[in-house]
Image (cartoon, coloured by chain):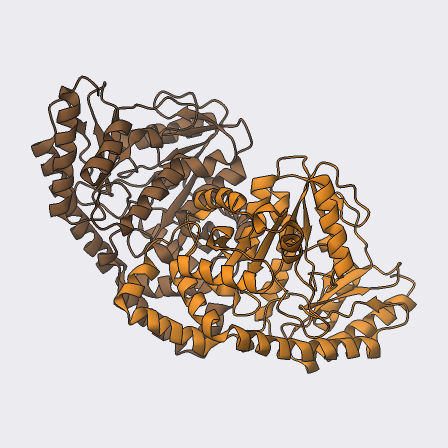
Chain colours: A orange, B brown
Amino acid sequence: MVASDIRERMKLLAAKEIIHLGGGLPDPDIFPYAAVAAASDRIWSNPTLARTALQYSPSEGHGPLRAWIADYMTGIGAPCGVENILITSGSQQGLDFVAKLLLSPVDRAMVEIPSFIGALRAFDAYEPNYVGLAGGDPTGVKFCYAGPDFRNPTGTTMSLAEREDLLDMADASGMAILEDGCYERLRYDGQPIQSLLALACARHGSIEDVPVLYTGTFSKTIAPSLRIGWIAGPAAVIRKLVLIKQASDLATSALNQMLLLDVVQHHLADSTATACAAYRGRRDSMLEALAEHMPAGVRWTRPEGGLYVWVELPKHLDATRLTQRALAEHGVSAIAGAAFYPRGIPAERNTMRLSFSMIPSEPARQGVARLGALASEMLSSPQR
Amino acid sequence: MVASDIRERMKLLAAKEIIHLGGGLPDPDIFPYAAVAAASDRIWSNPTLARTALQYSPSEGHGPLRAWIADYMTGIGAPCGVENILITSGSQQGLDFVAKLLLSPVDRAMVEIPSFIGALRAFDAYEPNYVGLAGGDPTGVKFCYAGPDFRNPTGTTMSLAEREDLLDMADASGMAILEDGCYERLRYDGQPIQSLLALACARHGSIEDVPVLYTGTFSKTIAPSLRIGWIAGPAAVIRKLVLIKQASDLATSALNQMLLLDVVQHHLADSTATACAAYRGRRDSMLEALAEHMPAGVRWTRPEGGLYVWVELPKHLDATRLTQRALAEHGVSAIAGAAFYPRGIPAERNTMRLSFSMIPSEPARQGVARLGALASEMLSSPQR
């Protein structure tokens, strides 16, 4: 399994000598430890809060956190109330639940190609046939999965016009849009563009009438292991998703929701700024290193945010072979692009994803230099 | 939806004047707050632990917790290693994952009747046809779901002979057994009986050869909102379930797994003893109150553990009507038994579930007295 290959590689994190440009884990140096510890103290020193923290939470989520997220979503242009928010265990669970709600075997699901592997594996469980977003026919499509901002794996951003076109397509065809907002706050430069959900709210006048379900998370701006994400959408759909939540794992941890709420109330802006500052510098270094070390014929994206750069090697160079040799012979991990193509759609074999999230600029530069040297060697070798 | 009816009633917990014999939430008075707070301090005061706690955990679970649970399972007669354990977000997620792995639409799933409503809703998502365990034909059945100890909703326990018979049936038919071990440690009297998993390990010589998948949880012995459960079974099946975990919500919170591990290492025996002492007294009071207040013709189970008593009213008395009137007119909540019957199988309309978990003995006695008086009134009335 491709997904398990990636997880296996992520286990290599334990091996310190590897230069990790593969996995896209957030950098633990930027997690707000003191804020989480203080939030924790506030809970355990207050018997009423402590009781709530250890008892089952409602399936739809801890009320005060839902209210905070509703306000947050309203603040980014998607006016909504608590009834429009379901708390999930990370945004991954939101992707799974929407697929569970909307997909039956051989239903058509539209995805960007390449696409986030976690989303593809979530959808795969419900056995859809995949259609590519670019030029794809929306007829009979149940939903289109899209990551408009700096998406995994390409780092690219949908323009406002592309967003409006996608909304037009949804309105005309009746398909839903599953928007992955997980990187939205990790913008390092350029102008923010409104989310598909916000644009749809403006277009339809109310969140109750939009075809968009938005998944969000605090895994990138606060820390992943609180496992708090959310789905925002029309209340009628949220009510169905609450039943799915209940049948899947009853509820998300009340403790984690309370910790997260305390931290975001006081520290979301700071924590997001810290993450953006750290990742912006690493992105810049990686782009510089690519320009310096990659041979002619190699192209890459220049992301305005997020954690990833997508590299296109010359057509005849096999990225799977290159990444295998890079790890085995040069101690550099990267993910061959083939992993990010949906089942049934041929992969571009000459692509790979690099992440700048996990390691400081200097070793990352060295990693890119080694990848560049290996690419040059393979390009000049008769056995590529 | 019946499941949401129950959740709605659980929301009535907020209304203090109701005597709650309906929902089966654990009593928050018995949660080990000081132990969780101390575990929390140990994590936040140690930078290495803190980093692990906030970063993604492996999908299969936090290694030290898996190892502890493997030892625990070995200690209760099911020798296994870390490769036989998957950490889940409560045992509910284990039920969902096993159904997701084994069931396709119109597959046959065998269940005890009546059965735990959370399990039925988890299975429903995969659209099986249900077969009752008692006298049911195992031909083509994908798995049999069984709660051998004081199961929800009846409080009854499978005898050793019944367990061996079920294992015989699995061995002969090729079906799997999904064992729900969630109440196993809440035994108040009588002799413990080995789990289906332990008996199967003894029978087959190794956990790798058993047809049993066991789901466990700390929600009843420690606290529910850490949301930590596990599945134990053959390593080959656990590997498939890890991929399902990864696609469903990536991983369970590392923080919660570390908190739980710290607490169980030091306090599981104490915490279990506290729970058993509290619930034993409440069970005894409820059984006394039933004997004192129920009219002739009403029967009930006498559970050796767990949280529930199952009441059978005279055949012609409708428990749905009785529980509705009890709540509206007498401020007592109870759950009509019809909720616990699987889709497609006719419900016994004269049954209801009482829980003794949430409230002290005296108000519970009063609640039973009101239910008894109402049952007497309805029995003597021309409109039942």
| Camera-nearest residue between A252 and B128 | A252
Whole-percent x and y of residue A280? Answer: 68, 77
Whole-percent x and y of residue B143? Answer: 45, 32
Q: Quick check: B301 above or below A182? A: above
Residue at the extreme left of the image, as rendered: B292
Q: Quick check: A299 above or below A316? A: below
Whole-percent x and y of residue A258? Answer: 40, 64
Residue displayed at 17% across by 51% down: B278
Q: Is residue B13 left or right of residue A85?
A: left
| Camera-nearest residue between B65 and A160 | A160
Residue displayed at 30% across by 30% down: B337
Q: Quadrant of residue B315?
A: top left
- Residue A113 shows up from this direction: no
How many numbered marks have been drawn onto this rendered protein structure? 0
Q: Is residue A332 left or right of residue B49?
A: right
Q: Quadrant of residue A291?
A: bottom right
